[in-house]
Amino acid sequence: MKFHFHVLINQASGSGQGKKVGDKISTLLLEKNFLHTLYYSEYAGHEREIARNLAETTLLPWNEETKESEEPFPLLMVIGGDGTLHQVINEFYRLNYDLPVSYIPGGSGNDFARGIGLSLKPEQAFWQIVKAPAPQTINTIVYDEKVQQETGVALNNVGIGLDAAIVATTNESTAKKQLNKYNLGSLSYISSILKLLFTQKGFPILVELNGNEHFFKNAFLCTTTNHPYFGGGVAIAPMAQADKRSLDLVVVERIPMYKLFWLIIKLARKTHTSSKHFHHFTSSRLRIVSTIPQYGQADGEVLQPQSFDITFTTRNQLVWYQK
């Protein structure tokens, strides 16, 4: 398959990790004589502008007729963190464009790459893209929040409570920038987890799915996820799969302080799902209502503390890589 790679690089992602990865891949493209054009995101929201312009002028949808074309296929390659890819996919969603993308992780957490089996090593991820004969169909989460009237798409997860507070705390941490310099950005998430496990309070939520209602008066974490990982590699939902056309909802109830260390051990061993405080649901559509203001997050993009009335459905996204 011949490509013309349109490479969108967010140099600021991962506190500069995006620049390092972008430099590696641009050098590789030159050395191997791949047809390519580079685009650099220079300010917040610029990646959306670049994606919109390419969608309207250059990129093409994928189909079997396209596969037979002798012309190089114009493929968008996003280099940055999960938040960068989130912005691009949401711009396509807003414009109602169904376009394939490729992705090379260059952020702090890189959970999307983990979740779909894409290498965290830039060069290996690049060759996974080049060697793929066609894109993979990946499930995504469509969310519609009624209180603040926010809608969008998430590739990883949408969380209310602990995981969102972790993201907000980590993003504000000065340690995150320092750790990213040594490719240890996920440690900043662990630090935030250890802190917030002891300070996050429980809150009531109502869950509606599959014709049933479930009420939790003391929820601690409420995450609708597309694959196992959040927070830089924490497998909160080991059973979730990104190529499955359904959503996985995890609700963890607040537990007594003296049990928290045991929960951490079980989480590290991926045996936390056996806890009576852990609740897992699967559905293609669900609704969550939370009346007590909490932090929210969508693919690591923070939603400031608010009440939620949010409905989730699914949508396919083509991602170009080989497992």
Image (cartoon, grey):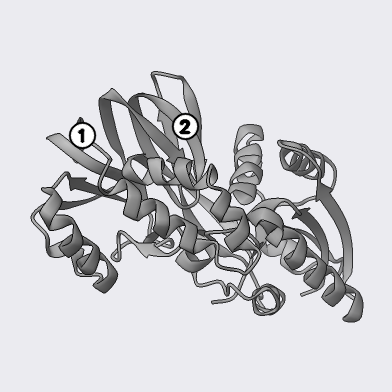
The quadrant in which residue 29 appears is bottom right
* Relative vertical location of residue 77 with respect to residue 89 in this rendering, above or below: below
Quadrant position of the C terminus in the picture: bottom right
Which residue is under mark 1? 208
Query: Horizontal and vertical percent for residue 26?
Result: 84, 68
* Relative vertical location of residue 68 with respect to residue 12 in this rendering, above or below: below
Q: CA distance from mark 2 to mark 1?
A: 22 Å
Query: The disc labelled 1 sits on which kind of residue?
Result: Glu
Q: Which mark is residue 145?
A: none
Residue visible at 80% across and 58% down in the picture = 7
Visible residue check, residue 227: no
* In the displayed structure image, the side of residue 13 where residue 75 appears, left or right: right
Query: Horizontal and vertical percent for residue 236?
Result: 31, 59
Q: Circle 1 sits in a helix, a strand or a loop, which is it?
A: strand
Quadrant position of the N terminus in the picture: bottom right
Which residue is under mark 2? 303
Residue visible at 89% across and 68% down in the picture = 35
* Relative vertical location of residue 238 with respect to residue 255 in this rendering, above or below: below
Q: Is label 2 or label 1 in front?
A: 2
* In the displayed structure image, the side of residue 321 where residue 68 appears, left or right: right
* In the displayed structure image, the side of residue 155 where residue 290 appears, left or right: left
Q: How many marks?
A: 2
Visible residue check, residue 271: yes
Query: Horizontal and vertical percent for residue 63?
Result: 66, 59
